[in-house]
Image (spheres, rainbow, N blue to C red):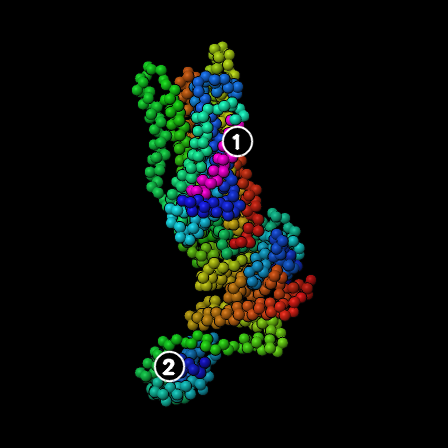
Amino acid sequence: MRTDLRLAWLLTRGSDRREGWRALLTALGAALATAFALAAVAVASVRGQVRVPYAAGLLNHPGERSGVVLVLVLLLVPVLGFLGQCARIGAVHRDRRLAGLRLAGAAPGRVRRIAALETGLACMAGTAVTAVFGALLLLRFWHRPPLVLWAGFAAVALCVPVLASLVGAVALRRVVASPLGWVRRERGVRGRGRALALVLPVLPLGAAGLLQLVRGPGAPSSSLSPVLAVFGAVALTGVGAVGTAGATARATGRWLGRRTGGPAVLIAAARLRADPWAAARTHAAVLLVTVVGVGFVGVREVLLEELHRDGRHYAADLDFYTTGIDLAGAAVLVALLIGVAGVAVGTAESLATRRRGLAAQHAAGVPRGVLVRALLLETALPLVPALLPATAGGTAVYVGYGALHGAGGVSPLPLLVPAAVLAGGLLAAATSLPLLRRSLHPAELRFT
Amino acid sequence: MSNPAPLLAARGLVKTYGGTPALRGASVVLRQGEILAVTGASGSGKSTLLHCLAGIVRPDEGSVVHRGSERLDRASEKRLSTLRRTEFGVVFQFGQLIPELTAADNVALPLLLAGAPRAEALERAGEWLERFGVRERAGARPGELSGGQAQRVALARALVTGPKAVFADEPTGALDSLAGEQVMTALVRTVRECGTSVLLVTHDAQVAAYADREVRLRDGAVLTDGADADAVLLEAGA
Amino acid sequence: MIGMSTRHILLGLLAGGPSHGYDLKRRHDERFPQARPLAYGQVYTTLQRLVRDGLAEVDGTDSDGGPERTLYRSTDEGARELARWTGEVAPPAPFVTNEIFAKVVVSILASADPAGYLRAQREAHMARMRELTAVKTAPGADLATVLSADYALSHLDADLRWMTTTAARLTTLTAEVHPA
C-alpha cells in the first residue's frame, strides 16, 4: 500500500497539462463537497432553541435546521455528478499510463488501486483547503464551538477523499488495462444495474407508504413520510429522465442518421448512436436538477399563495418564510450551476480526446461551422426529449403538494426551469467552442 | 512558354512553428495532372509544405499561386475552406475519417457539405467505394476496417467531389507493403483516369516511385540539384 | 553469378519436359523478365556441358519443316542435382562488391565529389524505380513480372537507403574536417 501511494504521488506529479486539469477540477469538486458537508455538520451540531443572527432566524429552530441540513446534503448529489465528469478528463491518457504500469508488471487490481489513490490525492488537496477555511470561519463566527462539531469536521475531512477513492475504484472496476494498451470496459450485467437504479428510488416511496399505513389515515402525518415520498419521487423521475436521455439519444441517432441530409446533423446523430449513454451520463445531474427545480418552483408558488391568503396569521414573520424559500431556491440554482459545469467539463473532454481527428477533418474541408453545429446538436438532441419526463416528474411533485395543501392547478412559472436548463446546457457546450477552434488549428496535424 | 499555368506554384515558403523553422524558402510547382512526390528525412518540412500548398496553413513568407493568378497565402479562411472541400482532396496517414460515421457516410460527407441530397450522395459514395474495391464494407465504421481498407475509403472520400488535386501525407505510412501497394495502385490508376494532380508526401522511395517526379527537401528547403528542379523552373518561367 | 546458375535454371526449365535450345531461351526470358536476356550461344554451350556431366541427355530431333533442332531432357541425376541446388541456402552477401560502393570509396580517396555522384546516382535509381513501378502496376501484369519488379525495387530501395545514409555521413564528415 505504501508503494502504491508513492507511485500514485509520482504519477500525479509527473502528469501533463490535461491531467492537471483533471486533478484541479477534481480538487474543486472535492472542495465543494467538503463545504456542503461541513456546513451540514455545523448546522446539525446546533442543539435546541438558539438565536442565530443570520438567515432571518431560519436556523433558530431544530425543525427548520433539519430542513437546511437536508438541502445541504442533497446538494452533494450534483457535486458527485460533477466529480464523476471530472474523473473522465484525460481518460485516454490515464488509460495509456495504466497500460504502462501493467507492462511494467503490476497486477490489474493494483493498477486500479493506484488509479483510485490518484483521485484520492487530488480530493485530499481540495478537502484540505476547504477544511482549513471552514475551521477559520467557524472560529471567527462561533464563540467556542462544541467538541462534537470538531469531531464532525475531522470525519468529513477524512471521509471525502476516502469516499472519492472508493468511488474511483468502483468506476474503474470494469476497466481492465492490458499491458499492450487495450483498455476495454467489460460489459457487466446491464440488467442488474438497471434494476438497482429502479429499485433504489422505489424503496423510500414504499417506506413512506408503509409509514402512512402503519399510523393509519386518521393519525397526524409524521414529517418523515412526505420527505421520503418526495425523495423517492424525485429520484425515480431522475432515473427515468436519464434513461429517457439514453434511449432517445440512441433512437434519435438512428432515426436522424438514416434520414438527414445535413452534415452537422449527420455527424451529431452518428455520435449519439455510437455512444448514447455518454449523453445520458453528462446530462444526469442537470436532469435531476430539472426535476427538483420544477418541483421547487411549483411548491414555492403554492406556498406563497398560501402565505398571502392567510397573511394575517403569519404577518409577524412573513420574512422568515420567504427567506427560507429564497435560500432553497438559491440551493437549486447552485445545483443547476454545478450540473451545467459538469456538462461543460464533459463537452470539453469529449473535444479534447478527438482533437487530432477534428483537425484532420477540418483540413479535409469540413467547415468549422458544421463542426460547431454538430457539437451543439450533440448536447441538445438528447437533452430536449429527456427534459419532458423530468418536467412531468417535477410537476407531479408540486401538484401533489398543492393537492395536500388545498391549492390546485398547474402554473406556467415552473416551465421556465426546463427552458433555463436547456439554455444552460447549450451555454455549457458553447464554452467549449474556443477549445474547438484551437483543436482545428493545423498545428494539431503535425503530430499525426 | 506556352504551357498552361501550373495548378499550384509555391515560391520561397517560410514557416516557423514556435521558434522551430519547418520551411526555409522552399519553392515547388505542381502541374496539372502530374503526380509529384515530396521526400526527405523526418523533420525536413514535407508535411508543412503540403499544408501550405493545400491551403491548410498560411506560410509566414512566400507565395502560393493557384492556377496562375489566385494567391492562396492571402485568400480568406472561407475561400480556403471551400477550396479544400471542392477543388482539393486530402488523405492523411489516419484521422480524416469520422469514427462514428459508416464508410459510405464518410465518403458521402463532402457531397452533403456541398448540398447534395442524402440518397444521391450515398449512391455516388457507393460508386467510389466500388472503384476502390471496398463497396462490401460500406456499412462498416472506420474502426471495423483494416488499415488498407480505411485508407481506400479515405481515398474515395478525397476523390468523390472530383477535385483537381489530391494531397496525400504518408498515405501508406501505417500499412504493410502489400496493403500500401494496393492503396497506391488504386490512387494512381484513378488520378490518371481523372487527370487529377497529386502531391504525395512520403519518406519511402518505393512509394515515391509511383510519382512522375520527385522533389527532395532538406532542412526546409528544396535540394536544387535535380534536372528539373522547381526553383530553376520558376526562375525561368517568372 | 549468372554463369554459375544458368545450368540450374536450364535444368529447371527442362523439368517441365523435353525442350530444344531456342525454346529454352524464349522461356527463360519469359520467366525472368527483368533479367539480362540469355544469349543463344550460352544456352547451347551450357546444354552441352549438362550432357557431358550426365545431368541432361539428347531426346531426339524434330524439324517442323524448318531447320533440324535437338531436343534435350533432364536425367534422374539432373533432377537430383536440381533438388539439391534449390534446397541449398545462398551465402548471404559474402563479399561487399558493388560498383556504387566502389565509386564512392574511390572518389573519397581521390578527393573527387562523392556527394555529387550520389545525387546523380539517386536520380538514376529513382528513374529506374519509376519504370519498374509502372511495369508492375500496369493492368494485366503477370506474376513473374510483378515478382521480378518487386525484387529489383527492394534492392534499389536498399541502395537508396545506403546512399542517403552515406550522403548524410559525408556532410557530417565534411563539417568535422572543415569547421565553418
User: Label 1 near label 2: C-beta < 8 Å?
Assistant: no
Furthest residue toward top: A312
Front residue (pair C137, B57):
B57
- The span picked out in magenta is A116-138
Q: Which of the image's four quarters has the N terminus of chain B? A: bottom right
Near mark 2 (Cα within 10 A), the count class, few <14, some 14-19 or many ≥20, is many
Q: Is residue A169 magenta?
A: no
- In the picture of the structure, the residue carrying the numbered disc 2 is C11
**Local SS, label 1:** helix
Name the residue rendered at 36%, 76% in the picture: C87
Q: Chain of mark 1?
A: A
Front residue (pair A418, B108):
A418
Residue A233, located in which quarter of the rendered image? Answer: top left
- Asked whether the viewer can see residue A420, the reply is no
Q: Nearer the viewer, mark 2 or mark 1?
A: 1
Near mark 1 (Cα within 10 A), the count class, few <14, some 14-19 or many ≥20, is few
> Is residue C141 placed above or below B144 in the rendered structure?
below
- In the picture of the structure, the residue carrying the numbered disc 1 is A133
**Local SS, label 2:** helix
Name the residue rendered at 44%, 24% in the picture: A44
> Is residue B58 placed above or below C26 in the rendered structure?
above
Name the residue rendered at 65%, 64% in the picture: B231
Q: Which of the image's four quarters has the C terminus of chain B? A: bottom right
Q: Is residue A121 magenta?
A: yes
Q: Chain of mark 2?
A: C
